[in-house]
Image (cartoon, helix red, strand yellow):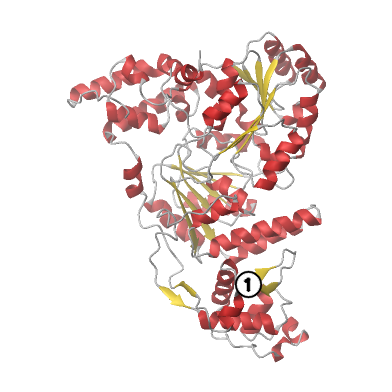
Amino acid sequence: MDIYQALQTYFGYDEFKAGQKKIVEGALGGKDVLGIMPTGGGKSLCYQLPAILMDGITLVISPLISLMKDQVDSLEEIGIPGTFINSTLEDNDINYRLQEIRQGNYKIVYVAPERLNTYAFTRLVKDIKISMVAIDEAHCISQWGHDFRPSYAEIPKFILNIPRRPVVAAYTATATRLVVDEIKDLLGLRDPLESIIGFDRPNLFYQVVKVSNKLSYVNDYLKNNFQEDSGIIYCATRKTVEAVTEKLNLLGYSVVSYHGGMDSESRQKNQDDFILNKVKIIVATNAFGMGIDKPDVRFVIHYNMPQNMEAYYQEAGRAGRDGEPSDCTLLYSPSDIVKQKLLIQNSTFSEKRENILYENLQYLVDYCNTNDCLRSMILEYFGEDSLEAKCHNCGNCVDNSEMVDITLEAQKILSCIYRVKERFGVSIIINVLRGSKNKRILEFGLNSVSTYGIMKEYSEGTVREIIMTLISMGYILVTADKFPVLRLSARSRDVLNGNERVYHKKHLLQVKPSSSKSAKAAHDVDFDEELFLELRDLRYTLSQEKGIAPFMVFHDSTLKEMAAYFPQSKEAMLAIKGVGEKKYESYGQSFLEIIRNYAQKNEKKERRPFYG
């Protein structure tokens, strides 16, 4: 069987996504590989397909203990024998599985990094042929990444102890160049074949919204967008998670919570209910989501700003894994910056790492305050070229708000920073400009500088907003310290001298103009919605009978193609993207029966060709 036959037979596709073929062929050719691929880019196929064709067992090292069962269930649904080893199993279960692995009954084994160097597992490794070791979420090995896991330090030692070194494959969705270099170095990848796919996710609509009442905004959003679909709301603290969950439940929404302070059974139940579509919304801290395979999350709302762009990109990227239009909304308020700085200050990281964290936080603050294309800012962060023109699919690019001249306000702020000799942070500058009689202002004698009180008619929030805008535009620099200091950049001179004007949006609150229906029309095939709903009901019934998530049966995109082309034979059904031999064997006849009855009743004919 060649790679295209395996792709069609097991996964139901006749072509690879960008970057996949290169990785698959590299691994099959015996080369180490490194895949930096965005969420939804098909990382798992890059190790699952070679695993089928290789002679031996593929070990997948993953930190996602709570999701390993779902991943193994998904493999079984497409006909690939797999199992997992982690701390959720009793000793007798582990021993049984180890024996089954020795007997060659599995092609893919998921294992938690904490189990790698245990006595039982190291003995197992000497008794079996390992064809490939795939490291999922590989950024966790880097101390410069946003989600460093100490247990990942065990991986290099484990690989060195394998009697015959296998192919080593590393995958992640988020990594700066610094993190990529450390992944290669720490894992000891040997001249790896790299496939770094662009970080752009065209189906995602990014927006930053500045509101005084976040809960009111969320309520209005949920009333008008994706009412029948799934979404995630991220909060910075457990307390906020619980408060938001309680209030949304009182408002009548189908919602559960998830955070590290809950007992493991409650967390697992809430996660399962969300994945199985028993509830629509999950409110969570960043403890939730890494490796979540749910493809039909239609919106991700960040109730609070996360700590850096990598975390934001990964969390927001859990929307729209199936390629369908989805929303990523960040609700921004200056108080979020204070919360994130406190988290950094209370950490035990080295001074060097702390400084990097402050710099990364500042980039996200700039993102929240820029008037430029949000998509371009994301691409620039990960080292890619920004878009040449507007993307027309982010809050800034669709915002037609009037731009007002704030040059005079900018000059006052820049002059104040200069007058206090560039020695203070945002709060002190605001207090000086607004003429505060704060004890610290008087102690430092800042009430005597010429800029004292020259913006007393402005609210604190407005002055802070303009300062943040000037930072994002590059007129003000911020030191990477626990207590950041504002300094003037070379560009500020042109504004102070009156040679450059500064403009800002008159209306700061920009809500997406529609509930994504216009975007959906552009992306979807022309499908029969009534048939789609019937197929979705059948999918839900079948998934409940088997105790698996609906998307493990078929993705929405597959059902929409069925509802567009009305396949009425096995041959036609196998031409639908996402329908492989095993899936057809398990579910094909049930779906064909629905389609045939509907087509006969509504005089619909099978459409061909399906593609091209």
Tell me where residue 165 sits by quadrant. Answer: top right
Residue plotted at (48% across, 21% down) = 7
Placement of 429 over or under 593, stated as above or below? below
Q: Name the residue furthest left.
A: 603
Seen from the viewer's position, the closer of residues 455 and 384 is: 384
Task: Look at the picture and state if 604 lies above or below 242.
Answer: above
Amino acid marked by disc 1:
Ile
Asked whether residue 308 is in view, the answer is yes
**Residue 117 appears in the figure:** no
At which x and y percent is residue 409?
Answer: 54, 81
Q: Position of residue 241 (x, y in %)?
A: 59, 51
Q: Quadrant of residue 587?
A: top left
Q: Residue furthest top?
A: 103
Q: Residues within 10 Å of mark 1 (few under 14, many from 20)?
A: many
- Is residue 107 found left or right of 217 in the rendered image? right
Rendered residue at 56%/25% (across/down): 24
62 lies left or right of 401 = right
Residue hosting label 1: 476
Q: Helix or strand or loop: what does disc 1 sit on? A: strand
Residue 324, percent from left and from top: 41, 40
Q: Nearer the viewer, residue 76 or 284?
A: 76
Q: Where in the figure is residue 188, as x and y percent of width and height?
A: 75, 32
Marks counted in the figure total: 1
